[in-house]
Image (tube, rainbow, N blue to C red):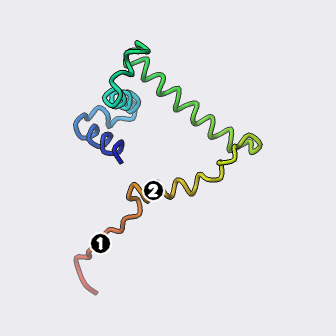
Amino acid sequence: MKHRKLVEDFLVRDERFRERKNKDKGIVILLTEIYPSILLPIKQDLNQLTQIVKDYATMDRAWRKILQERKELRGGDYGDKEELEEEKKEELGYYELKQVSFPYKD
């Protein structure tokens, strides 16, 4: 939940982060706030680090697509995804019931 709050707070304080084109750079900025030393060992500027994040996201999508298409390459935990997603959604409050009131009665 900590990361969700960080992202939400950043969206509130910096309107540029709300644009899809700025999402990756915004995430890099948040990562450098969490891990200040991330810039020191690799000596990269924000643009290069943003490119690393984009490359990661691209490789992650490719990995998921390949495993979807080629079942023989899937690991033993591949089938656990749905259960893990449901647990995470519950943890993040996706299923909280919200009270709805109607302005009139039948």
**Which residue is situated farthest in the right direction here?**
72
Against 68, is 36 above or below? above
Residue 43 placement (x, y as % from top left): 40, 12
**Residue drawn 26% across the image and 76% down it:** 102
| Residue 48, disc | none
The three-letter amino acid code for the residue at tag 1 is Val
Residue 46 placement (x, y as % from top left): 37, 19
Estimate the spatial distance between the alpha carbons at disc 1 and disc 2, rounded to whole Å. 21 Å
Label 2 sits on residue:
89
Between 82 and 69, the one nearer to me in the picture: 82
Question: Does residue 27 appear left or right of residue 13 in this picture?
Answer: right
The three-letter amino acid code for the residue at tag 2 is Lys
Residue 33 location, quadrant = top left
Question: Does residue 103 appear left or right of residue 68 in this picture?
Answer: left
Q: Earlier in the sequence, mark 1 or mark 2?
A: 2
Residue 23 location, quadrant = top left
Do residues under tags 1 and 2 come within 8 Å of each other at their CB atoms? no
Question: Does residue 6 appear left or right of residue 72 in this picture?
Answer: left
User: At numbered mark 1, what does the secondary structure look like: helix, strand or loop?
Assistant: loop
* Number of numbered discs on residues: 2
Residue 62 placement (x, y as % from top left): 62, 34
**Quadrant position of the C terminus in the picture:** bottom left
Label 1 sits on residue:
100
Between 40 and 23, the one nearer to me in the picture: 40
**Residue drawn 65% across the image and 53% down it:** 79
**Residue drawn 69% across the image and 47% down it:** 76
User: At numbered mark 2, what does the secondary structure look like: helix, strand or loop?
Assistant: helix
Residue 80 placement (x, y as % from top left): 61, 53
